[in-house]
Image (cartoon, helix red, strand yellow):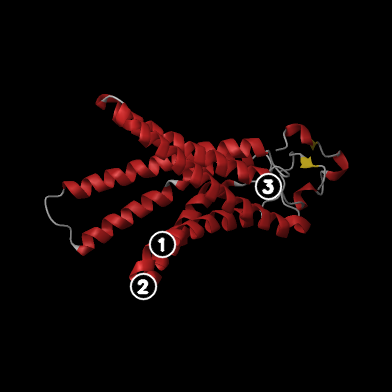
Amino acid sequence: MHTESNYSPLPPSSRISQSQKYVIVRSQRRIFFLKFLLMTLVGWIVGGIASLALEKTFLQLLPGLAPEYQENWLIWSKYISTGIFALIFGADQGLVVCKYISGWWWMLATTVGWLISNHVSTTWIEYIETIAASLEKTLSPTDTFMFAMISTVAYILSGIWLGLCQWLVLRNYAHNPWRWIFLPSFSFLCISVSLIILAQLQDFLPILGQGRFQYFGEQILTALMLGVIPSIALCTFRVKSNSREYTSN
């Protein structure tokens, strides 16, 4: 990844036209979109495999621990495996964006933001499930739908933390990128809608193939949304007036 030393200040004569320039120049948008989408897919797959393998390793060590340490071990193993996934995911995206902004800072922001978003989302969903379980009655279909919608909203809103962390990096290069704070939440919204549609489509498949179709469909759709939406948004931002432009642009 390129560091800050790979950027050079623009000469005074070019500052007037700076407001007309984009972070991703027009001639490079198509290739940027394809690269960002591809590396997001790779990061999602590789990060997911690494995370599952690490979590499985932690679980295999669990029986050897004293009972009083097992709960903490499970909690920290979840954090570490999620962190490894986020690090790989952010690093793969950083390899693409490093031509335009700091890839190292993008990787760090994505890792931290994903960890916070995941923790907030998990905490709220578990809290909602606890409330549902505490009701001394069998939940009606309406109640079940309501709690499911509340959990989905909690998941969507948690994306703000990821957007905020990435915005802290992006604001140094792009002009007024405040809407990026809410972009991951929009991506999570699109993911949720897509998964609902996918769940309806699986009813047309044979029972034996429904589970596999749903799992792979969910993974592919999630990765696509996390690649397509941010890459398009990055192409719409103009260069900050006092930012530095990569020399190849």
Nearer mark to the viewer, of 2 and 3: 2
Q: CA distance from mark 2 to mark 3?
A: 40 Å
Residue 140 falls in image quadrant: bottom left
Residue at x 72%, y 44% (from the top left corner): 100
What secondary structure is found at the residue carrying circle 1? helix
Q: CA distance from mark 3 to mark 1?
A: 31 Å
Nearer mark to the viewer, of 3 and 1: 1
Q: Position of residue 134 (x, y in %)?
A: 17, 46
Q: Earlier in the sequence, mark 2 or mark 1?
A: 2
Q: Position of residue 78 (x, y in %)?
A: 40, 37
Pick the residue in front: 78 or 106: 78
Residue at x 55%, y 47% (from the top left corner): 46
Residue at x 27%, y 61% (from the top left corner): 145
What secondary structure is found at the residue carrying circle 3? helix
Pick the residue in front: 201 or 73: 73
Q: Earlier in the sequence, mark 2 or mark 3?
A: 3
* Figure check: 220 above or below 162: below
Q: Are marks 2 and 1 in contact (CB under 8 Å)?
A: no
Q: Position of residue 247 (x, y in %)?
A: 82, 42
What secondary structure is found at the residue carrying circle 2? loop
Pointer 2 residue: 206
Q: Is residue 75 visible?
A: no
* Figure check: 238 above or below 74: below
Residue 75 falls in image quadrant: top left
Q: Position of 241 compared to 83: left or right?
A: right
Q: Earlier in the sequence, mark 3 or mark 1?
A: 3
**What is the three-letter code of the residue carrying label 1?**
Arg
Pointer 1 residue: 212
Pointer 3 residue: 96
